Image: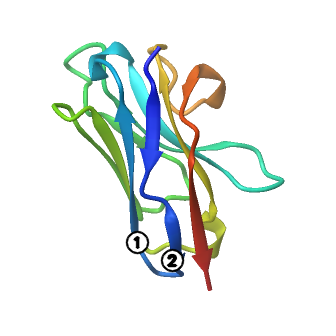
Amino acid sequence: ASQLVESGGGSVQAGGSLTLSCKISDDINANIYTGWFRQAPGKEREGVACIRTGGSQLFIGNTFYGPFVGGRFTISQDRPKKVVYLQLTNLKSDDAAMYYCATSGYDGANMRVRDYTNWGPGTQVTVSS
């Protein structure tokens, strides 16, 4: 399985921005979806965004976002560098969490947490008001 390493987390004030990076150790095509998830203390892990990085060429690059994103976040990929980014803007205190990168080989995974089988260690995002 790919090794995933997240970076880019940090502490920002509300309204600020961060860009998270997920470096994938092997072929970016090896998995159908690469997604970003987050988990705050005492809460369940939830899907933030995902992007198709493998499978049919027709769908590579398709993106999906959680309902709370509201146009504030953007997921993207740099295929030669094997990196998936998550740009966070207009951050709110509710966005504070550990953010995880994960991959899924399941074509229907979208942002279902249970369908992602390979996870990075996470990067912390802290938002102060």
In percent of the image, x 83 and y 53: which residue is there?
42
Residue 1 at x, y = what percent?
47, 14
Specify few, some or many for label 1: CA neighbours under 10 Å numbering under 14, 14-19, or 20 or more.
some
Specify few, some or many for label 2: CA neighbours under 10 Å numbering under 14, 14-19, or 20 or more.
some
Residue 59 can be seen, yes or no = yes
Q: Quadrant of residue 57?
A: top left
Q: Which is closer to the viewer, label 1 or label 2?
A: 2
Question: Which type of secondary structure does the marked residue at label 1 adopt?
Answer: loop
The residue indicated by pointer 2 is 12
Q: Nearer the viewer, residue 118 or 75?
A: 118
Q: Residue furthest left?
A: 80
Indicate left or right for 125 with 59 as reference. right
Residue 84 at x, y = what percent?
33, 40
Q: CA distance from mark 1 to mark 2?
A: 7 Å
Q: Quadrant of residue 2?
A: top left
**Is there a contact, CB below 8 Å, between mark 1 and mark 2?**
yes
Q: In the rendered image, which quarter contains the C terminus?
A: bottom right
Relative to 125, say whether 63 is above or below.
above
Residue 107 at x, y = what percent?
44, 15
Q: Amino acid at mark 1?
A: Ser
Q: Amino acid at mark 2?
A: Val
Q: Residue furthest right?
A: 42
The residue indicated by pointer 1 is 17
Residue 125 at x, y = what percent?
56, 63
- Which mark is first along the chain, 2 or 1? 2
In percent of the image, x 52 and y 22: which residue is there?
109
Q: Nearer the viewer, residue 69 or 19?
A: 19
Indicate left or right for 15 with 28 as reference. right
